Amino acid sequence: MNQTSRNNKLEPQFDQTKRLLVVGGRLQFAQIPEEAEHQIIIPHDDPVIEKLIMHLRVKACYRGPETTLAVLRERFWLTQGQREVKRVLRKCLTCKHRHTQSVQQKNGTVISRKSTDSTTIHEHWTGL
C-alpha cells in the first residue's frame, strides 16, 4: 500500500484466516465481537458494495444513510462510505417512497363574477 494512501490511517492488516484486508487499530482489547473489532476493508469501487448496502438497508429499517452506514460499519469498512451509501440509497425506490412528502394542492385562480365582455359566466364555463 502507498505511504500516502488515505487507508493508512486505518492501520490495515492482512487477516490470514479470512484472507482479507481488515482494519487494525487500538480495539484489540475491547470487549466487542471480532467482526466489529476488525472490520473488512472494501474499496469504494467494488461491485459488491451496492448489493451489500441494499441488503443492509432493510436491517437499518430504511432509516436513512447515517443509520445504514452505522449498520454497515458493524462488520465492514467502506472507503468513502458515506458518499457510497448516499449514492446507493438515492436509487432505492422504497426509501424514496418512505421519505416523500405529500403534495399540497395549490388554490386555483378565482374568476370574477362581473364579466367585462358580453359572454356570461355560464357560457365561459360550458363553452356555449
Image: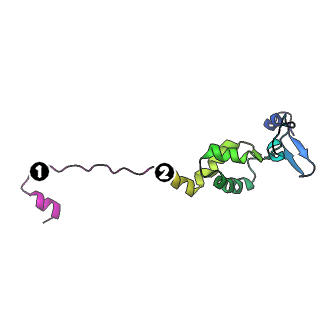
Most frequent secondary structure within the magenta stretch: loop
At numbered mark 1, what does the secondary structure look like: helix, strand or loop?
loop
In the shown orientation, is residue 34 left or right of residue 104?
A: right
Q: Amino acid at mark 2?
A: Thr
- Viewer-proximal residue, 36 or 116? 36
Q: Foreground mark, 1 or 2?
A: 2
| Quadrant of the image occupied by residue 80 | top right
Q: Which mark is residue 26?
A: none
Provide the residue span drawn in magenta: 99-128
Q: Is residue 105 magenta?
A: yes
CB-based contact (under 8 Å), mark 1 and mark 2 = no
Q: Amino acid at mark 1?
A: Arg
**Circle 2 sits on which residue?**
100
**Circle 1 sits on which residue?**
113
Q: Is residue 47 visible?
A: no
At numbered mark 2, what does the secondary structure look like: helix, strand or loop?
loop
Asked if 82 appears above or below 48 in the picture, the reply is: above
CA–CA distance between discs 1 and 2? 39 Å
| Quadrant of the image occupied by residue 54 | bottom right
Say which quadrant the C terminus sits in: bottom left
Q: Is residue 91 visible?
A: yes
Q: Is residue 28 magenta?
A: no
